[in-house]
Amino acid sequence: LSLEEAEACRASGQQIVWCSSAMLACIAKFQDLEVLDGDNGSMVANSIMQLEQVFIECMVVKVQDSPAPFIAHHRTIMTIFCLTFPFAIMNRVGWGLMIPVQTVISFAFLGSEYCSMEMEHPFGSDKASIP
């Protein structure tokens, strides 16, 4: 890349889109110069477009949040379950085991909620993220 092209890439704000467009323009230029034939140029262009599509899908995973009503509904249902579960097991386990059983089950549910919050955004810069 020339210095002007690098500056244009930085200024575009969407470097991946700019780079893929520049690569497609180079492929078209190579086809015009008959350096690449139609089939090979088409295969390379298709690979570049697939790479851009994969990048867009990764950005959706990184940027998209769960809908707020879903999160509120999920946490409300989980809280109601954790508060009412002791009454459901009262006749089966007795008073001595009710608190340990309830603690283990609530810990499992709340732990899975925490794990789902961490897995919602797998990419980032904190310790739990994928680099």
Image (tube, rainbow, N blue to C red):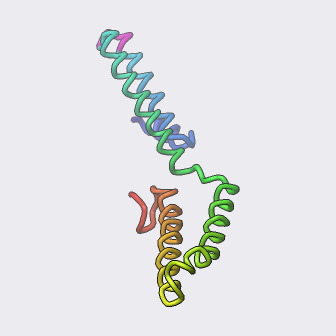
Left or right of 127 on screen, residue 10: right
Q: Is residue 38 magenta?
A: no
> Within the image, what quadrant is residue 122 found in?
bottom left
Q: Nearer the viewer, residue 66 or 41?
A: 66
> Within the image, what quadrant is residue 84 found in?
bottom right
Residue 113 rendering spot, x and y as whole percentages: 53, 66
Q: Residue at x 42, y 61 (%)?
A: 129
> Within the image, what quadrant is residue 44 found in?
top left
Figure disc tally: 0
For the view shown, which residue lies furthest in the right direction? 69
For the view shown, which residue lies furthest in the bottom direction? 96
Residue 7 rendering spot, x and y as whole percentages: 50, 41
Residue 46 rendering spot, x and y as whole percentages: 39, 22
Figure check: 107 above or below 37: below
Residue 2 rendering spot, x and y as whole percentages: 41, 35
Q: Residue at x 42, y 66 (%)?
A: 128
Q: Quadrant of the N terminus?
A: top left
Q: Residue at x 50, y 34 (%)?
A: 18
Q: Quadrant of the C terminus?
A: bottom left
Figure check: 46 above or below 35: below
Figure check: 100 above or below 35: below
Q: Main secondary structure of the magenta part?
A: loop
Left or right of 87 on screen, residue 92: left
Q: Nearer the viewer, residue 18 or 5?
A: 18
Q: Nearer the viewer, residue 77 or 113?
A: 77
Q: Residue at x 51, y 48 (%)?
A: 61
The boundaries of the magenta stretch are: 31-35
Q: Nearer the viewer, residue 46 or 80?
A: 80
